[in-house]
Amino acid sequence: MIDHAAVNVSDFEAAKSFYSKALEPLGYSVAMEAGEFAGFADSSGFSFGMFRRDPAGGAHVAFKCDDHAMVDAFYEAAMAAGGTENGPPGIRAHYHENYYGAFVHDAERSSSLVIP
């Protein structure tokens, strides 16, 4: 679980669409918008946001999942939303023997999402 994280994007509407679709399987949706900021929340509250900024900067964000099926659902949703694969779902024994995750770049390739 993360408390909160935010990424900077250059195309606000495209990024909002990408994150809305990619994070839906994890229970996230847009909870607030203010100017060029969008905040996403799950059932425990706000924990992820995005700002429109030039130049867009990179970020590495990891979302906690309950099981392998949730990781797989995130990966499929992120790919369908225009993400770029940076490591398909699977065991990453070099982290630890039970680490199952997927790695995805967002639609702008500005951020790396990790789902362990």
Image (cartoon, rainbow, N blue to C red):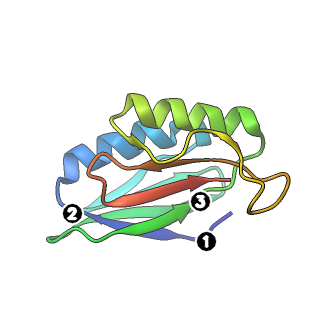
Q: Left or right: where does residue 33 sit relative to residue 3?
A: left
* Secondary element at tag 3: strand
Q: Which residue is mark 3?
A: 45
Q: Which residue is mark 2?
A: 36
* Residue 54 spot, x, y in % from top left: 14, 71
Depth-wise, is mark 1 or mark 3 nearer the camera? 1
Q: Left or right: where does residue 44 sit relative to residue 25?
A: right
Amino acid carrying label 3: it is: Gly
Q: Residue at x 66, y 57 (%)?
A: 44
* Residue 10 spot, x, y in % from top left: 17, 60
* Secondary element at tag 2: loop
Q: Which residue is mark 1?
A: 3
Compute the Cα span from label 1 to label 2.
Answer: 21 Å
Is 94 placed above or below 42 here? Answer: below
Quadrant including the N terminus? bottom right
Amino acid carrying label 2: it is: Glu
Crowd around label 2: few <14 · some 14–19 · many ≥20 (10 Å): few
Is 116 placed above or below 5 here? Answer: above
* Residue 102 spot, x, y in % from top left: 59, 45
Is 106 placed above or below 79 here? Answer: below
Q: Quadrant of residue 64?
A: bottom right
Among the two numbered marks 3 and 2 on one chain, the one whose residue lies closer to the N terminus: 2
Q: Quadrant of residue 78?
A: top left
Amino acid carrying label 1: it is: Asp
